[in-house]
Amino acid sequence: MTLPPGPKTPLWLLRHQLNTNPTGFLDGLYKRYGDIITIMSDSTPIVYVSNPSAIKQYLTNTKEITISSLPPGDSPITVGQMGQQGILHLEGLIHKNRRPILMKVYHGERMNASGKSICELTKQIISQQTSNKTFIAHEILSKITLQVAIEVVIGLREGKRYEKINHLYTSCIKYERTSLFNLVKDLPFSQIDFGRLSPWGYHKYLLREIFEFLYNEVKERRQEADPSRTDMLCDLIFACDETGKLFSDEEVRDLLFLPILASRDGATHSLTWLLYWVHHLPDVRQQLLEELDSLGENPDPMKIVALPYLNAVCCESLRIYPSPVFSLPRVVVSPVEIMGYELTPGTVLITNIYSTHQREDVYPEAKQFQPERFLQKKYSPYEFIPFGSGVRSCIAGSFSIFQMKLVLATILANYKLELVNNKAESQEHANDQCYAKSGVKMVMHGQRQPLEKSKPLVSNLF
C-alpha cells in the first residue's frame, strides 16, 4: 500500500499545534501536502481528505467506523463519557432505528414551534446585560443554547430540576475548557480517579452526576407516561427498538446525554463566530438590518428564517470557521482507491471540513467573509459540509442553522452591540471544536429603538 504523503512530526506535537493554532496549522498542511494527507497513529494510518469528489466517493463506498475501533487517544470521545449505548457508538440496524427518533425534535413542526421560544429566551438573557459594560459573547450565548437544548431534549425550562441539570452541564463544559483538564487529558498516565478532589476524578464525578440525573428523569417520566409531550425524552420513552421492544431506562439515558452537549457546545461556538463576523464587518451588519427591518416589528420567526441574506451570512460563518473541524471517521473494509492511492482495510478516513471549505477552486477568495457566494451558487453536500455528510451527519444540523438565524436576528433587531476590539479574533481547538480564543468581548449600548428600525434612508434634499 502506498499511502498519501504526510508529516513525520510526533502525533502529540501535531495535536498541540492543532489545538493552539487550528486554522494556521491546517492551512500549512494543505499548502504542503494538498487534498489528501496521512498521519500515523502507531501502525494505523489516518487519512484526511479535503477533495469534494474523493469525499463523495468514500462516503458511498466505505463502512462507517465506530468510536471504539479508533486507536487509543484518537477518539474525540470515549465510551465512558458518552454512555455505551449513545448514538455515536451504535451502527447498522440499531443506529438506523435510533437516529430518526432522535431527529424528530429537530425537524418539521417541532422545530418551527420552538422558534418563538428561542426569540423570547434570547431577549430575556441579552436584556440582562448592563449597558456600556464589557461581556463575553460566548458565555451569554452558551446560556441561550444550553437552555434551548435542555428544553428540546428533556422538556425542562424552569424549576429545581432544570436548575440542577443546567448547573451540571455548565460545570462539566467549563471544566473541560480549563488548562488543567486539557493537560490531564493529553497525559494518559494522569487519567486516574482519586476522587472528586483530583483533576481526572472531578471530571468523572461530574459525568456520573449527569448520568444519574438523566436516569432518574427517565424513570420518573416513564411513570408519568404523557404521550402529548414533544421533547426527545418523550419520543424515546414511547419508541420501540428494531425488535419491537421498548428501550430500557439505561438506553434512553445514554441516548439523551450527547444531544444536550452537542446542541449546546457546537451551537455556542458557531453563534459566537457569527456575532463576531457581523459586528466585525459593518457593511454585512447594515445589510442584515435592512433585511430584518423589511419584516416590520415583531416578525413571525418563520419569516425570519426564510430571509435569504440572513441565511447566506450564517452559511458563510459556518464555512469559514466550521465547528466541528473534522467529520466522524470511517474505516476501509475492503481495498479502495482514493485519488490514486490504494488503501487497505483498517485505514481510517476523515473528512477535513475546514480545508474543504477553504478551497479556492470552490470558494474564490476563501479567506474573505463573503455571504454573497451563497446567494450566487448552491453548493453540493460534499463542498459545504458544516455538519458532516451521510448517515453520520449531525442530527441537529438543520436545527442549528434555524437557531443561529433566530438568535442573531433577535439580537440585531433589538440591541446595539459593539466589539470591544475589532482586530482579527484568534482561534483555539479542543474536542474537535474551533472556537474564538477570547470568547469575543463585546459591549451593549442599549436597545435599538423602533424609530431606528423604520427610519427611511433618504438623502438630505435641502
Image (cartoon, rainbow, N blue to C red):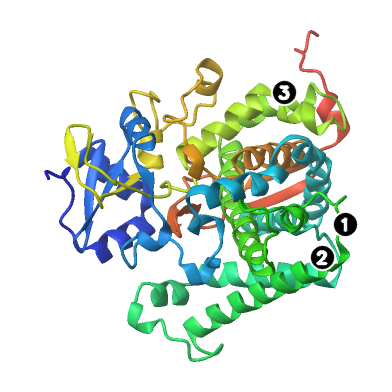
Which mark sits nearer the N-terminus, 2 or 3?
Answer: 2
Q: Are marks 2 and 1 in contact (CB under 8 Å)?
A: yes
Identify the amino acid type marked 2.
Arg
The residue under the point 37% across, 44% down is 63
Identify the amino acid type marked 3.
Glu
- Judging from the image, what secondary structure is the residue with disc 1 in? loop
Identify the amino acid type marked 1.
Asp
Q: Is residue 33 left or right of residue 401?
A: left
Q: Residue furthest top?
A: 461
Q: Where does residue 382 sit, x and y in percent of width and height?
A: 42, 30
Q: Is residue 141 left or right of residue 95?
A: right
How much space separates mark 2 and mark 1, taking CA atoms? Answer: 8 Å
Residue density around tag 1, few if under 14, some if 14–19, many if 20 or more, within 10 Å: few
Q: Residue 28 is drawn in which quadrant? A: top left
Q: Which residue is mark 1?
A: 226
Residue density around tag 3, few if under 14, some if 14–19, many if 20 or more, within 10 Å: some
Q: Which mark is residue 291?
A: 3
The residue under the point 59% across, 55% down is 262
Q: Which mark is residue 221?
A: 2
Q: Relative to 35, is 229 above or below?
A: below
Which mark sits nearer the N-terminus, 3 or 1?
Answer: 1
